[in-house]
Image (cartoon, rainbow, N blue to C red):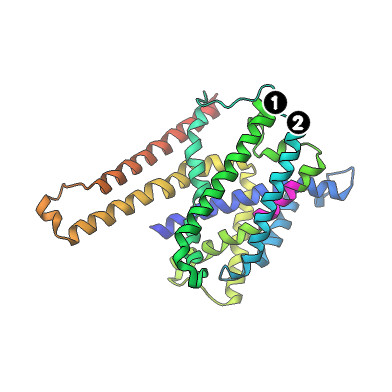
Amino acid sequence: IVNVSLVPLLLCASLSVLIAIADLLTPIWQHALKTENYDHWYCQYWFVMLLCVAIIYPISIPNNLSPLKWSSSGAVLSIFLVFIFMGIRFCQHGVAKDSKIDLFVDSPIATLALPIQGLAYASQFNVVGLYTELGEHKRHINTVIHCSMAFTCFVYACFGLLGYLYFGQATGKYSMILDGFHNDKLMLVAGAMISLTNILKMPLIILPFRHTVNLILTGKEEFGLAISSLETIILLAVIYVLARLVGDLALGLELSGPTVGVFVCFILPAMLCYKADKEKWRNRGLSTYLGEEHFSRTQITALVVGLLGVLMGMASVVGLVFQQTE
């Protein structure tokens, strides 16, 4: 059930990242062509997305994370440079007059906040591979995980705060903060760097995606180079088609957050925790002594987390329905 649930999670994550890359690179590509007629096929959104897939394909074929250690360092450097560029523009622009952060948002889609964040932080499919790649430094795996999550939280919080302070009440118009900087060459460079970061991140999604599909279908994670190349082409083709059908990053997150995001990040871990703890008590022979209806604190916590996940998913779906019918 874990592997099966990871398939839609990785699919949603990959198509969302591909849409984000194409959204950022399309204006940069059109600006670089220096043409007045953007109706040509090579100026279209679908062609830019196809170019992104062509770039992602060769770096997604390897069956381990080792070749990505240098590219990952480049991705982190790109994030720091984007922070600098955002800081430059913020210092020049200042705080918007109508900028404010509403702690209690009067909107039916406010319920999407936690499901989408859960989807964004769902990176547990890389932990096993990361643990293997650490080699003799495996004892530091907890430090690596905690530092990575802390850095990610910091990045999300800073980008969100800058967006609210810079654009004010207009923040909600944009799927991504960088979409608000129209014809700004410095922010076009920032968009290119974010796109580079996402392109280099795609193998971290494609690799576990391919391994998970292989485990479900054949019971084996890896195959030879030729098979891996063919599988990668098929996966990227499916991701490309679905990304074109969805088309909008916000829509992709709205659909995947309350469904796949809630299930994998809240409901499934709660189910596994509850079952593992119940087995532990049974193996100790305490379940018979205490009665079959005994619930430990761990089991109660797991049930509460699972119930909250169900309620969040239902509330998010209802909020989306209300938004569409308004």
Horizontal side of 221 relative to 293 (left or right) equals: right
Determine the residue positioned at 58% across, 54% down.
14
State the mark number for residue 38.
none
Q: Is residue 92 visible?
A: yes
Residue 231 shown in magenta:
no
> Where's residue 94, x and y in %?
73, 29
- Image: magenta residue range: 190-199
Question: How far separated are the C-alphas under marks 1 and 2?
Answer: 8 Å
Determine the residue positioned at 58% across, 74% down.
227
Horizontal side of 109 relative to 5 (left or right) equals: right
Quadrant of residue 278 in the image?
Answer: bottom left
Mark 1 crowd level (few <14, some 14–19, many ≥20, 10 Å Cα): some
State the mark number for residue 96.
1
Amino acid type indicated by mark 1 = Ala
> Where's residue 44, x and y in %?
77, 48
Q: Please state which of residues 72 and 115 is positioned toward the viewer in this rendering.
A: 72
- Asked if residue 227 is positioned above or below residue 319 in the image, the reply reads below
Horizontal side of 181 relative to 137 (left or right) equals: right
Describe the element under mark 2 as helix, strand or loop: helix
Describe the element under mark 1 as helix, strand or loop: loop
Magenta residues, dominant SS class: helix
Q: Please state which of residues 60 and 314 is positioned toward the viewer in this rendering.
A: 60
Mark 2 crowd level (few <14, some 14–19, many ≥20, 10 Å Cα): few
Determine the residue positioned at 52% across, 63% down.
208
Horizontal side of 190 relative to 213 (left or right) equals: right
Q: Provide the residue designation for mark 2.
A: 93
Check whether the beta carbons of the residues at disc 1 and disc 2 lie within 8 A of each other.
yes
